[in-house]
Image (cartoon, rainbow, N blue to C red):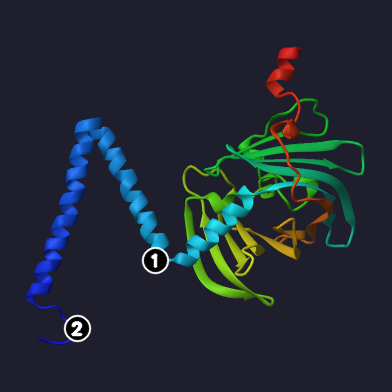
């Protein structure tokens, strides 16, 4: 017998293993069929096979599991208040600066993030984003000139936020909760050794991006550079994270720069103060009466 090749006994044992494996799943399928009916059992089997496939993928790439678990837990532990400024810098150096306050907290039904932006005039833009535990996103807003909150249509999620390079949906990192995640070859970004995660949305994920590629520091599991590819056009938006620091046990960036390819200038979000343990409750995220409520009051 040649070295490294199984003998007859080895192949026989392997065939017995395969037969036993197949029979085990067949018996489970039959039991499900009797209990729930063929349609329900088929659905259950598909779910089971999907879970087995996902488990095998994680087992084959423990680094992928590490990156996703760390990134999701970071978001699920959010409980902060911040103040800062949002500045658009034109290609000729002209600056337009806005002040903002923000707060975020992860509740049992997902993340809520409320941002209020005040510009050079007295008008304000208020945005409430809610991301469910499955990554489903909804956005409500009170825009300048409006007196009541209303749902922001999906078509507007990619609109520039007060004229900057940040869009409404850029305010949350929903890409880490998308269905499709792939770990690319590791890279260095500056002096940092990084995991490179490519996230692509599934049919259930509402987004204006075809993919998001994140360079994530291996030691602190925080993004340092992110590139988002816009749906349909292939245009890319780049995000660079500066001044990474740990506050109240949580890592954050003191500044985030956004650049849109082919567009002169960039935008900068600067955090000037805040707390990483704000102990927020649902009452802290009251945006105001909804559009429907406002109509009923008239």
Numbered disc total: 2
The residue depicted at 12 percent of the width and 73 percent of the height is: 10
Q: Residues within 10 Å of mark 2 (few under 14, many from 20)?
A: few
Residue 292 spot, x, y in % from top left: 68, 20
Q: Which residue is the site of mark 1? A: 60
Crowding at label 1, few (<14), some or many (≥20) Cα neighbours within 10 Å?
A: few
Mark 1 touches mark 2? (CB < 8 Å): no
Residue 16 screen position, x and y as percent: 12, 62
Q: Quadrant of residue 145?
A: top right
Question: Furthest-left residue in view?
Answer: 8
Q: Nearer the viewer, residue 263 or 110?
A: 110
Q: Would you say residue 79 is visible in this rendering?
A: yes
Q: Nearer the viewer, residue 216 or 152?
A: 216
**First in sequence: mark 1 or mark 2?**
2
Drawn side of residue 209 relative to residue 256, left or right: left
**Residue reaching furthest to the right:** 121
Q: Nearer the viewer, residue 154 or 192?
A: 192
Place of residue 71 in the rendered image (x, y in percent of width and height, measured from the top left)? 59, 57
Could you say where residue 56 lies in the image, as x and y percent from the top left? 36, 60
Q: Secondary structure at mark 2?
A: loop
Q: Quick one: 197 or 206, which is closer to the camera?
A: 197
Q: What residue is shown at x 88% (from left), y 51% (from top)?
A: 97
Which residue is depicted at the point 83% across and 62% down? 91
Q: What is the distance, in whole Å, between disc 1 and disc 2 at their CAs?
A: 24 Å
Residue under pointer 2: 4
Asked whether, in this view, residue 126 is left or right of residue 24, the answer is right
Image height of 160 relative to 32, above or below:
below
């Amino acid at each position: 017998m040649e070295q490294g090749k199984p003998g007859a006994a080895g192949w026989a044992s392997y065939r017995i293993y395969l037969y036993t494996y197949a029979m085990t799943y067949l018996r489970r399928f039959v039991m499900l069929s009797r209990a729930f009916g063929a349609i329900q059992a088929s659905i259950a089997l598909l779910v089971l096979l999907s879970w087995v496939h996902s488990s095998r993928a994680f087992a084959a790439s423990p680094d992928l599991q590490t990156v996703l678990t760390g990134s999701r837990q970071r978001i699920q532990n959010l409980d902060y208040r911040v103040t800062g400024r949002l500045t658009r810098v034109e290609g000729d150096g002209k600056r337009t600066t806005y002040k903002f306050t923000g707060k975020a907290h992860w509740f049992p039904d997902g993340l809520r993030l409320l941002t209020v932006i005040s510009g050079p005039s007295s008008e304000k833009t208020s945005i409430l984003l809610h991301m469910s535990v499955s990554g489903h996103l909804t956005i409500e807003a009170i825009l300048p000139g409006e007196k009541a909150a209303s749902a922001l249509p999906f078509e507007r999620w990619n609109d520039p936020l007060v004229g900057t390079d940040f869009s409404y949906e850029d305010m949350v990192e929903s890409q880490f909760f998308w269905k499709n995640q792939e770990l690319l070859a590791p890279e260095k970004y500056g002096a940092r050794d990084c995991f490179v995660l490519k996230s692509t949305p599934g049919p259930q994920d509402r987004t204006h991006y075809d993919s998001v590629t994140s360079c994530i520091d291996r030691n602190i599991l925080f993004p340092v550079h992110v590139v988002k590819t816009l749906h349909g056009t292939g245009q890319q938006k780049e995000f660079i994270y500066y001044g990474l620091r740990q506050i109240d046990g949580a890592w954050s960036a003191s500044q985030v720069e956004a650049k849109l390819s082919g567009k002169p200038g960039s935008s900068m979000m600067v955090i000037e103060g805040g707390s990483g343990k704000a102990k927020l409750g649902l009452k802290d995220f009251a945006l105001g009466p909804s559009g429907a409520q406002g109509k009923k009051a008239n």
